[in-house]
Image (cartoon, rainbow, N blue to C red):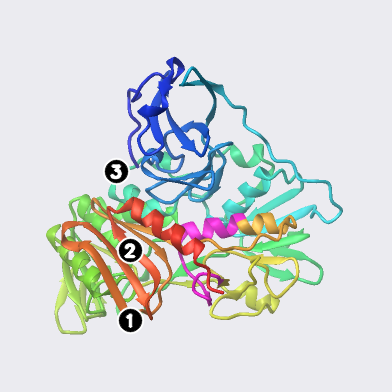
Amino acid sequence: MADEQTSPAGPDLTQGVALSDFVDGRLVGHIGDEEVLLVQSGAEIFAIAAYCTHYHGPLAEGIITDGDVRCPWHHACFDLRSGEALRAPALSAVDCWKVEQRDRQIFVKEKRERSTSRLPASKNLPGRIVIVGGGAAGFAAAEMLRRRGFAGSIVMLSNDAAAPVDRPNLSKDYLAGSAPEDWLPLRPEGFYPESGIDLQLDVDVVGIDAKAREVAIGGGKTFIYDRLLLATGAEPVRLPIPGADPSRLHTLRTLADCRAIIAAAGNARRALVIGASFIGLEVAASLRTRGIEVVVVAPEARPMERVLGPQMGDFIRALHEEHGVVFHLQDTVAAMDGSRATLKSGGTVEADLVVVGVGVRPRLALAEQIGLTLDRGVAVNQFLETSAPGIYAAGDIARWPDPHSGAAIRVEHWVVAERQGQTAAVNMLGQNEPFDAVPFFWSQHYDVPINYVGHAEQWDEIAIDGVIASKDCLLRYKRQGRVLAVASIFRDVESLRAELAMERAVVQ
């Protein structure tokens, strides 16, 4: 996350600025200590806070389209008129100001009052909504329900011991020691009771009766629902390594997992990371930032080649090697004896800390118990409703009909999960809003961010613009000439434009 600037930039907007001072239809100035972005959109001028509410990304460096502004860092989107956060990962609105034009000058006046959504009166509105899951999708759904003015009961059942946190940070800044723990909660502790969200932590849902519309948790307590959202997420794959003490094989999914790794890292000299997944290599980068030697063992020939291709895979390996990571690729851990790992190739690795990052699997047990239609995930329609009326699914478990690829897909991205939770929320309120967001994720390796939009399981061409090794590039993954996905390094605006182009080129 970026530190907030100590002094505001640009002119004092209360004193007026000329339209000729704008560059590409925008100008950054200030009102008191607050930086404000002025945007010209058609004949109108809008004044909106200059920084994204997610990670403080500079909105002036994003793109303006269709009455909104999009953040260049992680593709959050805000309404220029109201400041509402239209798309995750931003969840909080930005401030807006009134604007007055006179004598060919533009003056920014007082702040606009935040509008509150109110649902139209309807006999079809649910009275009770139960959300199973305390991750990205579950939290985003609960927050959106209240934002849209839903006044009924919301029960959120989570098997995590912590309230919803910013999970991407667990493998990035927080694990690296460069972000404090108070950055992690998605909302302060008081948000849930103040918003009337009954968040129950460290509970296991043991059964769902779809006919009676009832959810049961351990201990015999039950909850009645009118609408149900399954957002059970995924769980790390655990490897059965002969001789290994399971308590010493760390995985990373929860805040508790991250705390355990940090505690173990305190006395560690060398870490063994099993798996060259995004999580595995982000863990490797974070542990190197802490000064710990890192060895990565993985079966593939190149890190992340399946998702990003050989060229980017070679770059990622070289980047980590520049930072001292040692790779044993096309190899696996065959056995462990204390701190010694024996590799299938015959080599050995001594390590004080072992982290397994070989992927996750969707938690489908509850969906299977209900009898929902499954397809390597929970099959949902365009509105994220499952085969059982009134039951929705979002996040890592949901396989939905993607209008951009023309196929049913399931992805395990944080931003997708949040956006699906938001869409499921409005549809549980009867809005019939199709989920049509282009998948997006970002990964961070040391000081190198990789943005990825779209979804490409297979491609026959990778068109590279720029130089990957120079950390200035954009890769287009194509199949039969059509762009399915785009990965980029330090090409933020082009990444946004690629996302917009995919939105507008829906497969018929």
The span shown in magenta is 402-422
Tell me residue 392's x, y (percent): 67, 65
Sequence order check, earlier mark of 2 and 3? 3
Locate residue 370 relative to residue 441 in the image: left or right. Answer: right
Res 178 label: 3
- Mark 2 near mark 1, Cβ–Cβ under 8 Å? no
In the image, residue 38 sits, relative to residue 243, either above or below, namely above
CA separation, marks 2 and 3? 26 Å
Res 251 label: none
From the viewer's perspective, is the residue at label 3 or at label 1 nearer? 1
Label 2 sits on residue: 487
Amino acid type for the residue under numbered disc 2: Ala
Label 1 sits on residue: 460
Disc 2 crowd rating (10 Å Cα; few below 14, some 14-19, many 20+) is many
> Relative to the observer, which residue lies in front, 63 or 230?
63
Tell me residue 124's x, y (percent): 83, 56
In the image, residue 256 sits, relative to residue 212, either above or below, namely above
- Which quadrant, please, contains the N terminus? top left
Q: Pick out the residue farthest to the right.
A: 123
Sequence order check, earlier mark of 3 and 1? 3
From the viewer's perspective, is the residue at label 2 or at label 1 nearer? 1
CA separation, marks 3 and 1? 40 Å
**Residue 465 appears in view:** yes
CA separation, marks 2 and 1? 16 Å
Amino acid type for the residue under numbered disc 1: Asp
